[in-house]
Amino acid sequence: MNTPRIDSAPSGTLDVLVIGAGISGLYQLYRLTQTDLTFAAVEAGSGVGGTWYWNRYPGARFDSESYTYAFFFSKELREEWSWSEHFAGQPEIESYLNHVADRFDLRKYITFDTRVTAMDFDEDTHTWKVTTANGDVIHARFVITGIGMLSAPQYPPVPGIDDFRGVSAHTGLWPQEGVDVAGKKVAVIGTGSTGVQVISAIAGEVGSLTVYQRTPNWCTPLNNAPITDEEQEQIKSTMDQLHESLKSSFAGFMHNFAPVEAGAVSHEERLKFWEQLYNAPGFAKLLGNYMQVMTDKVYNREFSDFVESKIRTRVHDPKVADLLVPDHGYGAKRPPFETNYYEVYNQPNVELVDLRTTPITKITETGIETTEGTEDFDVIIYATGFDAITGAYDRIDITAGGASLNSAWEDGPFTFVGASAPGFPNLFFLVGPHSSSGNVPRMSERQVDFVTGTLGEAVRRGATRVEATFEAAKEWTDHVYELNSTSLAAEEKIDYTYGTNTPGKKIVFRHYDGGLAGLNAKMTAVEDSSYAGFEFK
């Protein structure tokens, strides 16, 4: 019989504690309802949704097609929910996730407003002692973390952030009541994916907008549109086929690399193909492209030149366009998808500041000071990203046998299939390091099924302790690094997956380049070998 929330659960030890009630946490809870294990979940926010609870800034939306991001585990759910757009906005996404929580009665297992601060594994009882910021202590045999790879917001490393007397907000901690920018003098710091979205969304209503850009990126059109009745019918009637297609694709998207090599066609044919991609939806530009664009400098430069020509066509002032054209190859950083982003810089009330030549020196009581002077603002928006992938783990004091996970991962994560780490028994990761490349819900779906199966194997064996072996973790981690070493991105190491955007962080690859295809192949091999790579005691 399953156990409800920790605040109403009987005293004693849970079989499983899930940390986080986002996409992966909700599906993990659903899978646990199908077992005889006792379980509960804690969530730092006041509601479900994870990323889609915290990131409610103007313009926040999917850049994966809505129907490929959603859950597939229930035919009834798929039939009763209809997305309004090919790339849904945050309010609709949050509504969907609340619908899922209520539809499957998952909310009763979740204790909200509860942030985990520390975890220590008891070697004698084979249980985790989990401490929360509220002072609660929870004992659980197994802990599953669904804490997100982009859930540790960070601010620019400049003094005075707390001194500003106007309104300020981080896109990853956007206030529930919103931020009034109408007619206001607004600054946005950061032009990654969230910055691009929020800038595009508010440019038409602000009094003035100053964008502080550190690194320009290759932004291409999202090409969003409402879903027509005919499209809705087609989507609903082919959901099973779509799910199978996503599971067998490289990265869990409905886009697959071009079936021909770039060098097999003429330059003119490539340009024609790229023109089609530019007008296609979302990730088609990255994952529907020639694979050689990601692996061959010649074709990468050619495609980058193609996108540069689009930027220069759309931005009227050549000097501004110069600042918006990246000096790295396409795909070296995760490319944002945009709607009328470049047109924003044609507005007379919009200014672009290049932080590489004019860095911010401090935030003042009234605005932002750079090396060229001070400008006052009513609102400052920090679109400055996250301490990615391992940042959320670094903010929890996780110890086992006197060893710290933070210390163990100081030089980079060391995992087995991105799901477990030697030395930290009975602890499993969802969408953590070395496991999360691609369409995240499709990745987490496979990870949740794998972790649930591992728990089932422990029950079958009567084991109270499950731990990845050092040898298995070394083999997987070596594979992760070797695979990444062949990519063009590894030459520049400027993407957040290397920790480059976080001052003082070790520059090492924390993602996984094998996509869903590689992750699924390895997890299937582990399952078929009776979970070789784990020790059960």
Image (tube, grey):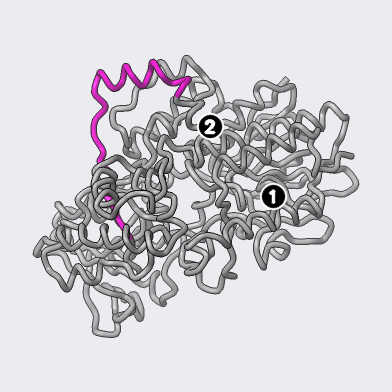
Q: Position of residue 191 (x, y in %)?
A: 32, 61
Q: Vertically, is 116 above or below 144?
A: below
Q: Secondary structure at mark 1?
A: strand
Q: Which residue is mark 1?
A: 131
Report the disc number at residue 461.
none
Amino acid type, residue under disc 1 in the picture: Thr
Q: Residue at x 44, y 37 (%)?
A: 253
Q: Which residue is mark 2?
A: 247
Q: Position of residue 75 (x, y in %)?
A: 49, 16
Labels 1 and 2: the sequence-earlier one: 1
Amino acid type, residue under disc 2 in the picture: Lys
Question: Magenta segment range?
Answer: 218-241
* 482 on left or right of 68: right
Report the quarter where the C terminus lies: top right
Q: Residue at x 40, y 42 (%)?
A: 258
Q: Residue at x 25, y 52 (%)?
A: 271
Q: Quadrant of residue 170?
A: bottom left
Q: Vertically, is 258 above or below 333?
A: above
